[in-house]
Amino acid sequence: MRLGDIAPELVLLGGGVVVLLYALAAPRRLQAGASVLATVVLAAAAVRTTTMLDVEETLTFADTYAVDGPALWAKLIILGTALLTVALSTRWFASDPRRGELYAILVFSTLGAVLLAGATDLMQLILAVLLASVTAYVLAAYHRRSKMAGEAALKYYLLGALTNGGMLYGTALLFGLAGTTTLVGLAQNVEPATGWVAATAFALVALGLSFKVGSFPAHPWVPDVAEGAPAPMAAFLTVVGKVGALVALARLASVLPADTVGWRPLLALLAAVSMTLGNLAALTQEDVRRLLGWSSVSQAGYALMALVALQRSELAVPALLYFLLAYALANLAAFGVVVRLRGLTTRSDYRGLARRRPLLAGALALSFLSFIGIPPLAGFAGKLALFAATIEAGYTWLAVLAAANTVVSVGYYARVLAPMYFDEASGDFPAWDAVAGWATAIAVIGFVVAGLGAEAVLDALVGLPLLPR
Amino acid sequence: MLTLAIFAPLAGAMVLFLIPERRPMLIRGVALGISLVPIVFQVATSTEFDATGGFELVESAAWIPTLGVAYIVGVDGISLPLAAMTALVFVASIAYPVDLRGRPREYYALFLFLECASLGVFLALDLFLFYVFWDVSLVGMYFLIGGWGHGDSARRAGLKFFLYTLAGSLAMLLAILGLYLSMEPNTFDMAAIIDAQPLGATGILPVLVFTGFALAFVVKAPLVPFHTWLPPAHVEAPAPASAILAGVLLKMGTYGFVRILLQMLPEAFQRFALPLAVLALVSILYGALVSLAQGHMKRRIAYTSVNHMGYTVLGVAAAAAALSGVERARALALTGAVVEMVAHGLITGALFLVSGSVWRRAETYEIEDFGGLAGRAPFLMFLTAIAAFASLGLPGLAGFVAEFQIFVGTFGVFPWIAGLGLLGILITAALFLQMLQRMFLGARPQRWDQWEPLSRTEAWALSTLLAFVVLIGVAPSWLLEVIHATSTAIVGP
């Protein structure tokens, strides 16, 4: 047990407190300083995480927390997302006199997601889910006067309370079976013969985590939050929970006996329903943010394919992390365009954007193409690795379904792209905030480079064990 | 050299954005100059090409070794002529005047982007790379049809094209993964897969992999009943894009039949050769008959593509029908199929460009609206006639060389199918002669009295394409030697 093992987490915790104190003390005209402070905190945590990449992998704090490759990479994705979110937020919240607190909550929410990715103990996992969720409700409802944001946050909260309860119950069952809540203990003590209890328990915990992942069956909050929450927060909330919770779910699945618990078919089912439901629902959306929300549900389904392939394919973990990286960047870019256009969100409002603002239109088009998985963007290598892992794991039907879903998804992406490129603009596109523009550009460059340099990224990800011995 | 040929257009596409939008002629000139670069490189490489039958001039670099992906390009006797034809059709299409809708840079940049993708498909020797180029070509064509097509229905047509071919290409992606995972160690290297032949004919996996690939290729080629995306896409696209779509993009499907199914899965292909030949026959007859019924010029030409791709697939299927025996007939059929790809690219490219000239002057494609144009546009008639006669297989022109070999070869393997397929040529002759007669002969409606003669650019672009059609028709041996070396290598000594 060394404090250094959780240095990034400590930076976030301490930094979050500092940002909060600053926001409380600073006068209104200096509230913007909170965003600078938050940037410094997040960047410091990211830098500290980077230095840990070549440290030996270990379990720490009595086996409750992992310092290993998947955790560190997930942390980097989460911290990067948070940094870009801060950049997207500065202008968006400029008229909010109490915006300083937003950044404090954002840092704490980031901490919650980071803890999710490292948790190797179920109690620890619950704490992380609660921290990430409680802060997320606030972030979603930060526009206090917006009815839509309020509705989204309320639905978000109710669904969260329900699924968190299920997760607690599942944890209790697992504790009863194994006498411990650490994953190491579960791996040793869960008897294969107690299969159905363990299966129920896993299903309940998976239900709780699917809330953070934003996948079926706890997905209904995603489109609401994507549409109703402040656009920068929507970008943040649809990404970070996915990254943390998918790593956590992968850890839990890999310690339970696959044959009797049957987590593989269960996760395959969740993946299949998520991607299909998300895509079909997205087809008729007239609101770009809501469309991005449904597309996020379907992307969660694709990501779950990696979990189905755990232990059967060496590509499972790299595919998961790489796909999440690609998704996070493309999603940030897409929401970044929305932010840059002052929240412009009705599909028909994008008519003719390409003529007036070719760069923004290009950013949105590229991020959609990456979602679809058009090479050489990062989304393609991500899907390719996912498909390969799934087929190798013996789930060819799932890969076929995912391919079919990809075709369907072209339909709704094209519904936005076609008027954007082929129609004439009816008016000007008022835009604000060069900072958001730069953040969007960074995200776009990120997924283009990650796609072209897929080798370097995948090479770093291959062979990462989920639980250090 | 090949790498430069592939990526020069892409680099050029970016250069175009440095030129101000209000100089469309300058932009076109620069785009045209850039599109000549691949030709220069290809001519330079072809002097080093030995026609040994295997892959030559291979350039490779590591790309994603973790996944077994490498950047490998190279040519053999099949891809070299196809790449050359591609470059040529692109030059003619880029040179061709068209309504730019005030967006010249985007239009020409998309063309150059598409040229990069198309050359890449034919020159890639890594399945992953092949797939990458294949997929980005869809994106380029989608935007060309949607952005510069004829109105609102163009967007629907573009989307239909995109969805159909993307569905096919995802089936192909799964099939590629099937091949990839059956290699030990896992690799996408085409030459290695051709050497190893990882899948036999037994079991379900070869059938699934074959089906995945075949689905992608019959949609792309296209064969009946997977052709329904083709007529709207051709009709709605701007004429030069139609020329590329028919001349180049369709060839990707038939090229896949040869390069992947015939070379990597010959045993599975053998089991499916007869059904595929029957499908090709249906396409030949159905395409010709439906074409005959069309009063719309572009639609008529579009359906002849279905017919001609039927000939090509018939030739490939004949080559695949046996693993040994009747080698000479099979090699002949395969050579014919490849010549047909080249010839059809040049001929149909020219025909669609002609339709573009007609549209610019008349704003209509209905054959019934015309008549007696010979008096006003003798040179246009002359060029159209060459293209039409070449397409219907008149001796002395490129189409004949191709179809003769296909049918002679197929007679040795599937005599009945070859016999019935000949009917297709008869119908094609009827439909082209009828079109020529209605448009150029007879009484001229008064509205066409002010018909503008062909501009110099139009004349040059068409003449260049058709000069090669005549050259291949009159003196085909230089082309046949190159192709035949590879087809004999493929079907066995």
Image (cartoon, coloured by chain):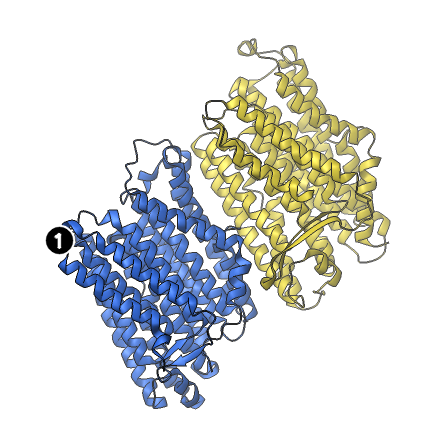
Chain colours: A blue, B yellow
Residue B381 higher or lower than A227, as above or below = above
Indicate the secondary structure of the residue bearing disc 1.
loop
Residue at 20%, 48% (x, y): give it. Answer: A94
Which amino acid type is marked by label 1? Answer: Pro
Residue B406 higher or lower than A278, as above or below = above
- Residues B456 and B32: in front is B32
Give the mark count.
Answer: 1
Horizontal side of A387 relative to B187 (left or right) equals left
Quarter assignment of residue B97: top right
Quarter assignment of residue A364: top left
The answer, for residue A259, to whether it is visible in the render is: yes
- Residues A231 and B78: in front is A231
The answer, for residue B294, to whether it is visible in the render is: no
Q: Quadrant of the N terminus of chain B?
A: top right
Residue count near mark 1 (Cα–Cα under 10 Å), binned few <14, some 14–19, many ≥20 = few
Residue B159 higher or lower than A293, as above or below = above
Where residue B279 appears, as percent x and y from the top left, is 67, 48
Q: Quadrant of the C terminus of chain B?
A: bottom right
Quarter assignment of residue B301: top right
User: Please, which chain is the residue tagged with disc 1 on?
Assistant: A
Where residue A219 appears, as percent x and y from the top left, is 32, 63
Residue at 44%, 49% (x, y): give it. Answer: A445
Where residue A227 appears, as percent x and y from the top left, is 27, 52
Q: Which residue is mark 1?
A: A27
- Residues A103 and B244: in front is A103
Where residue B348 appears, as percent x and y from the top left, is 65, 32
Horizontal side of B472 relative to A99 (left or right) equals right
Residue at 54%, 20% (x, y): give it. Answer: B360
Residue A307 higher or lower than A298, as above or below = below
